[in-house]
Image: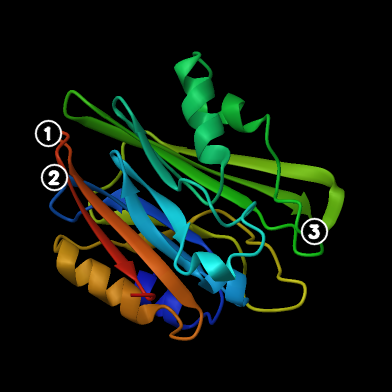
Amino acid sequence: MKSLFEDVSNNAYPGRGIVIGTTPDGTKAVTAYFIMGRSENSRNRVFVTEGEGIRTEAFDPAKLEDPSLIIYAPVRVRGNDTIVTNGDQTDTIYDLMAEGKTFEESLRTREFEPDGPNYTPRISGVMHIADGKYCFEMSILKSNNGNPDCCDRYTYSYDNPVAGEGRFIHTYMHDGNPLPSFQGEPKVVEMMDDMDDFTAKLWDSLNADNKVSLFVRYIDIATGKYETKIINKNK
């Protein structure tokens, strides 16, 4: 099990990241999503609430260039499901699950982002909480070692999450040109009971120059009630 904060602080550019897990006391389901940016366009963003979820928005609309890959709803809630992704595949999952498709089936209609030569992976997660029970899934869609002719698809299911344990997946292994896609299974990371401390430590661990926004949500597994925190670098 890794320290989430050490792992993040030792990586200047993990890109966008999703954490899903359970508090050590076993009472809360946890998710976090952060975005980073190297270009002015990527850094010109904030998280804003939208319904039970959030969306990205241009901090300075006058500086917004190409919105296609940076303006989207990272978090949406559909009934007992909380969907978290790094792109507009949030809407794909939401819509197709409403039609009876599974999380994995929904993502078969999508692939990595068309931003060659990086071909940024699409990372996604869904948390299902109902009747005091909790499970989650995570996914990554990425190019085949930088070859855009093939999309590699991986889905990970966690049907009885262990208290105090989380899973962490992010888009890039580290900074570079082109940016190397994440490799391996989602990392096993330590979680925390205290939401304020968890949020502050994760935000402080992100590279000061590249971090943009952070979303954290703690959901009571017994009741489904949740608390959300958002931090934006742009204020």
Q: Which mark is residue 27?
A: 2
Callout 3: helix, strand or loop?
Answer: loop
What type is the residue that disc 2 sits on? Thr
Please state the horizontal and vertical placement of residue 216, each as a whole percent of the image.
Answer: 29, 57
Whether the residues at callouts 3 and 2 have beta carbons within 8 Å, the answer is no
What type is the residue that disc 3 sits on? Asn
Inter-mark Cα distance, 3 to 2 = 39 Å
Whether the residues at callouts 2 and 1 have beta carbons within 8 Å, the answer is yes
Inter-mark Cα distance, 3 to 1 = 42 Å
User: Which residue shows up at 86% across the image and 55% down it?
Assistant: 147
Is 120 left or right of 189, judged from the image as shown? right
**Disc on the earlier residue, 3 or 2:** 2
Residue beneath label 1, please?
A: 222
Q: Which mark is residue 145?
A: 3
Callout 1: helix, strand or loop?
Answer: loop
Please state the horizontal and vertical placement of residue 84, each as a whole percent of the image.
Answer: 43, 45
**Residue at the bottom extreme of this rendering:** 209
- Figure check: 184 above or below 28: below
